[in-house]
Amino acid sequence: QVQLVESGGGLVQPGESLRLSCAASGNIFKVNRMGWYRQAPGKERELVATATNGGSTNYGDSVKGRFTIARDYAKNAVYLQMNSLKPEDTAVYYCYYKRIGVGVIPNYWGQGTQVTVSS
């Protein structure tokens, strides 16, 4: 089992920045992918950004150039720096962890943290 705890959400105005943090604990495998997804009301959960332990990153099209993902491997932590926030970035942001390997591998999710961008 893996536990994920997020922090850093809140209410900001358009154009401002926010940084999310997520700490993983439990049965952490060295080869893994961690990152962030988000879900707005009435919409499906979508990719924000993920990064492997090897440094390979993947970003959703709507956040490229504005958001940056970073990892602290010693702390099993992942961060999301969000700049130039827009009202359409409003959503619950979920931390994500998955071991990289063969076979059926479960996804792990945090409890979610609310990000609201509004003037």
Image: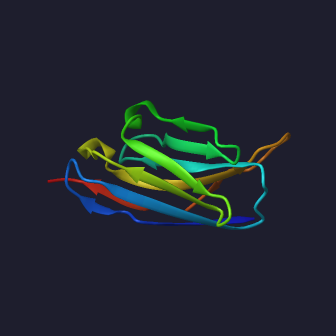
On the image, the x and y values in percent for residue 114 come to: 37, 60
Is 93 located above or below residue 86 in the figure? below
Question: Residue 33 versus residue 115: which sits nearer the camera?
Answer: 33
In the rendered image, the residue lying farthest to the left is 119
Question: Does residue 10 appear left or right of residue 15 in this picture?
Answer: right
Question: Does residue 102 appear left or right of residue 24 in this picture?
Answer: right
On the image, the x and y values in percent for residue 57 come to: 58, 38
Does residue 112 appear anywhere in the picture? no
Question: Does residue 47 appear left or right of residue 71 in this picture?
Answer: left
Quadrant in which the N terminus appears: bottom right
Quadrant in which the C terminus appears: bottom left
Does residue 91 appear anywhere in the picture? yes
On the image, the x and y values in percent for residue 56 come to: 64, 38
Name the colouring of the figure: rainbow
Question: Residue 102 versus residue 66: which sits nearer the camera?
Answer: 66
Q: How many marks?
A: 0
Is 5 located above or below residue 78 in the figure? below
Question: Does residue 93 appear left or right of residue 119 in this picture?
Answer: right
Identify the residue at horizontal 56%, vertical 36% (top origin).
58
In the rendered image, the residue lying farthest to the top is 61
In the rendered image, the residue lying farthest to the right is 103
Identify the residue at horizontal 47%, vertical 35% (top origin).
60
Identify the residue at horizontal 37%, vertical 63% (top origin).
9
